[in-house]
Amino acid sequence: MPRKPHEPEYTREHARGGVHANLPEIETWENQYAGYEITITIPEFTCICPRTGLPDFGTITIHYLPAKLCLELKSLKNYIVAFRNIGIFNENAVNRILDDVARACKPKRAVVRGEFSARGGMRTLIEARFPRKK
């Protein structure tokens, strides 16, 4: 479909939008047990499309096998809420969340899943996994 004259092209700034945004720190606490998994569901995730400026809505699910540290939920909430004013593509948001979760708690493994509401008749599901395969 050809671009309309009034629509801007995607730029490098669009593609990189939000990837390096300054976000609140995700705090952790010392894990006391082994051999269990944690799933955190965040059903009201929002961010801004860096091209259109329109809001994107979705559910983020973080599933991880903790090693020595667990994610502290209040700081995680503050971190997630900070995305609401950031222009970032959904794919980048999911991958950024995975990177920040992995950096914070150094899990044995983790999956971040983003299920985004329909836009233009299409829904998007994105999964990113740690450790990342090369």
Image (spheres, rainbow, N blue to C red):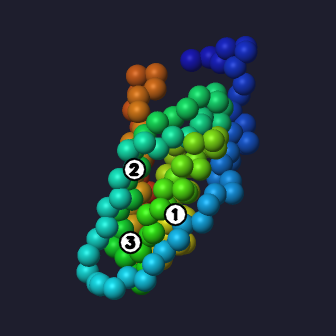
Foreground disc of the pair 2, 1: 1
- Name the residue rendered at 34%, 73% in the picture: 65
Q: Earlier in the sequence, mark 3 or mark 1?
A: 1
What distance separates the C-alpha of mark 3 from that of mark 1?
A: 20 Å
Residue 48 horizontal/vertical position (percent): 59, 37
Residue closer to the observer: 16 or 56: 56
Find the residue positioned furthest to the top: 5
- Mark 3 is on which residue type? Arg
- Name the residue rendered at 55%, 32% in the picture: 55
Q: Which residue is mark 1?
A: 75
Q: Is residue 31 above or below residue 48?
A: below
Q: Is residue 15 visible?
A: no
Foreground disc of the pair 2, 3: 2
Mark 3 residue crowding within 10 angstroms, few (<14) / some (14–19) / many (20+): some
Q: Earlier in the sequence, mark 2 or mark 3?
A: 2
- Mark 1 is on which residue type? Ser
Q: Earlier in the sequence, mark 2 or mark 1?
A: 2
Q: Do the numbered discs 2 and 1 sit on residues whose CB atoms are within 8 Å? A: no
